Image: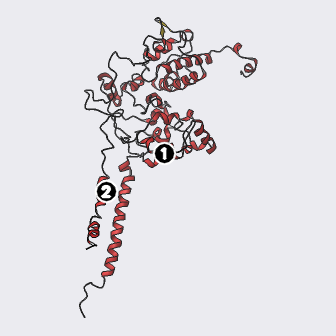
Amino acid sequence: MSQRPRLHLLRLAWLPLCLLLTACHVDMYDQPRYTANQPSELFADGRAMRPPPANTVAMGSFDDQSAMFTGRLNGELAVELPMELTAELLERGQTRYNAFCAPCHGQTGEGNGVAAYRGGLTVPTLHNDRLRTVAIGYYFDVITNGINRMYSYANRIPAEDRWAVAAYVRALQLSQHANADDLNPEERQQLP
Amino acid sequence: MSAQIFPRNANAIAIISIVGLLLLIGGIVAALVGVYLSPWYTEVGNAKAQPVPFSHKHHVDQLKIDCRYCHATVEQVAHAGFPSTDTCMSCHSQIWTNSPLLKPVRDSYQSGEPVVWNRIYDLPDFVYFNHSVHVAKGIGCASCHAGTNEQNLTAKAQALWMGWCLGCHRNPEEFVRPREEVFNMNFDTSSLTLDQRVSLVEEYQIPTDGRLTNCYICHR
């Protein structure tokens, strides 16, 4: 009699095999929540990612009248950066410029980027007297709103980075329009 | 003499059936593992049809356009950012404007209806992954998306096994690269010495105290 319960248990030894059936469970793979770029049946446009409602702005430090976000001071294009000019800002601007602007404007700003070349587009150079002397807010304004055939890049480049690009454009302009008298004697010796 | 209950070959049949059963079970397990690892299940290398036959090879390898031109949020948020129709049109409003291949993009731009692409990577919802931290800590696009710049049609480069994730989380010094090279698809991390990579891990403050292999790092 003492063996009977143990035998009884042995007969249940196949039960762990049922675990194999659960291996195909995918409930947790697709949980009832949205991730980026997923479709949605809930919204009329079929998108889970919601575009911001019209005429709304971000809360917090956002000031839609400030030079930081408009490129303008009292309606005029800003002539100064709304932040401090640092080496980091220029480096940041360089990476943004090379990623977003260089395809058309070229890495030196001559307007000979690969998209311009392959597409047969005439892209104006950044190195002429008008653009060298225009207020720096002009560049912010163009990146934000686009101009002529150039689209707005505001949804891909945050405002701070747009200023960094504007500052880097100034550096590019200087690089192609530098005065040899501004160099110190050592540097001047390296000129060809 | 009483008749034998079992025939003479009963022992052999018993042994062969036991061995055969074991082989059968082993074979089934091996076949399941094989299916599990095969591209049929993982979709690695299987290019999917898309509404527009977008070529990374053309845009990345030949035109040298930076990854961030289209995947613009990769440095700021968890997802790399799928380009909107506006992004496509910022070039293709001027270039290839009559191409029938780009008609879905032009239609989308006019109607406001998104182009519905077929997803390549479908990370399970129980895994947390953040692009921005990897990019900021010197893990290159090519570490996970190797060869995407060579693909005419995009296909998965990795099956995203957990063991594969852990390989890097255990030994980040094997895969780290300088931040300037993160978006360079052709950079070879083995061009740095191990010492150089170890010092990058230190400089970028990648934790080496085991935190990176904590369950909670990815399953949160």
Residue A20: image tag: 2
Q: Is residue B146 visible?
A: no
The subunit carrying tag 1 is B
Residue B161 percent coordinates (x, y): 42, 48
Residue A132 percent coordinates (x, y): 57, 11
Residue B187 percent coordinates (x, y): 55, 39
Question: To which quarter of the image does residue A84 belong?
Answer: top right
Q: Residue at x 59, y 18 (%)?
A: A171
Q: Are marks 2 and 1 on the same chain?
A: no
Q: Is residue B54 visible?
A: yes
Per the image, label 2 sits on a secondary structure element best described as helix
User: Would you say the residues marked 2 and 1 are in contact, meaning their CB atoms lie under 8 Å apart?
Assistant: no
The residue nearer to you, when weighing B38 against B202, is B202
- Badge 1 is on which residue? B213
Q: Amino acid at mark 2?
A: Leu
Q: Compared to A73, does A94 lie above or below?
A: below
Mark 2 Cα within 10 Å, few/some/many (few <14, many 20+)?
Answer: few
Of the 4 image quadrants, the one containing the C terminus of chain B is top left
Q: Amino acid at mark 1?
A: Thr
